[in-house]
Amino acid sequence: MKIGIVGGTGDIGEGIAMRLAPLYDIIVGSRDEVRAKESCTCSIAALKNRGTSCRSFTGATNQDAICCADIVILAVPFRNVITTLETLSCFEDKIVISPVNPMEKRDHFMFVPPEDGSAALMIRRLLPKEARICSAFNTIAANKWKALNEELSYSVPVCGDDEEAKRMVMGIVNSVSKLQGFDAGPLAASSMVEALTPLLLNIARYNKMRDVGIQFM
Ligand SMILES: NC(=O)c1ccc[n+]([C@@H]2O[C@H](COP(=O)([O-])OP(=O)(O)OC[C@H]3O[C@@H](n4cnc5c(N)ncnc54)[C@H](OP(=O)(O)O)[C@@H]3O)[C@@H](O)[C@H]2O)c1
């Protein structure tokens, strides 16, 4: 299975790429192909240092990352989602995963959704109707993805309207470290998942904690 990561050079994109690379073919996407290739070189070296071998792990433009992939992860900041998607195509037959959290830091972190109700529903509106959108990976901090010597023992809520796509995304979630995917309902329920991240950041801030995550028991 080929997984393309739009914005794969970023904090969460690089971490997700390294965690998935031993199991899936990864195409790290960027607006700048050179940056994507540099990111891959660093990630492959980090994995090699740990004695971890990976499958195909390549850098490309965001557009090529989408075209080559079966599954696309949109790892760009919420404020850049609209302009990014306006420049990209080829989503028709893809499963698209949104880890995007629309939030702002004011006095405290706040969930600030678009008019659609959530980033995932906005992405649904912007992409062709054949693309199957799921939200996942919204609540795991980038630092944790990149801490390759640590297990990822988190619950991962997954929302989506296409049951087959949601099952496939939960399969990917469950294949990484100790992550456990949970069906969190239709895409319309994504706002509740996206709103968890500002909550987690506030808990970290006001309790002097770092990289707070969630586990459903
Ligand atoms: N960071 C976390 O801990 C975390 C946790 C859970 C979910 N998330 C979500 O994951 C998404 C990515 O977060 P992140 O922290 O990884 O973001 P980031 O590092 O700030 O940016 C990710 C990538 O987006 C691309 N980008 C930056 N500005 C852009 C622009 N103006 N237009 C198009 N692309 C642009 C860049 O790639 P190129 O310059 O190579 O194109 C960058 O490497 C966000 O929606 C966030 O809510 C983040």
Image (tube, rainbow, N blue to C red):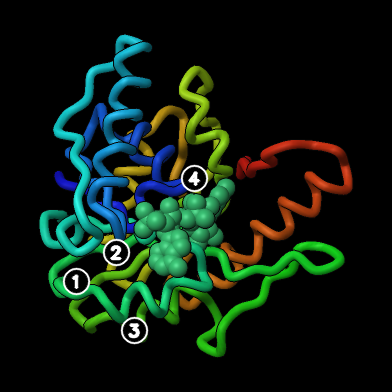
Q: What residue type is labelled 2?
A: Val
Q: Is residue 111 left or right of residue 37?
A: right
- Give how far across and how far down residue 49 sits, in percent: 35, 12
Residue 201 in view (yes/no): yes
Sequence-first tag of 4 and 2: 4
Numbered disc 1: secondary structure: loop
Which sits earlier in the primary sequence, circle 1 or circle 4?
A: 4
Q: Which residue is rendered at x = 33% and y = 38% of the image?
A: 39
Q: Distance between the residues labelled 1 and 4?
A: 23 Å
Q: Ligand 1 within 8 A of label 2's CB? A: no
Query: Would you name the residue on which mark 3 appears?
Result: 126
* Residue underneath mark 2: 96
Find the distance from the CA under tag 3 to the CA under tag 1: 11 Å
Q: Gap between marks 3 and 4, in whole Å? A: 24 Å
What label sits on residue 11 in the rendered view?
Answer: 4
* Image-based side of 71 in relation to 9, left or right: left
| Residue behind mark 1 | 91
Q: Where is residue 138 in the image (x, y as percent from the top left)?
A: 52, 55
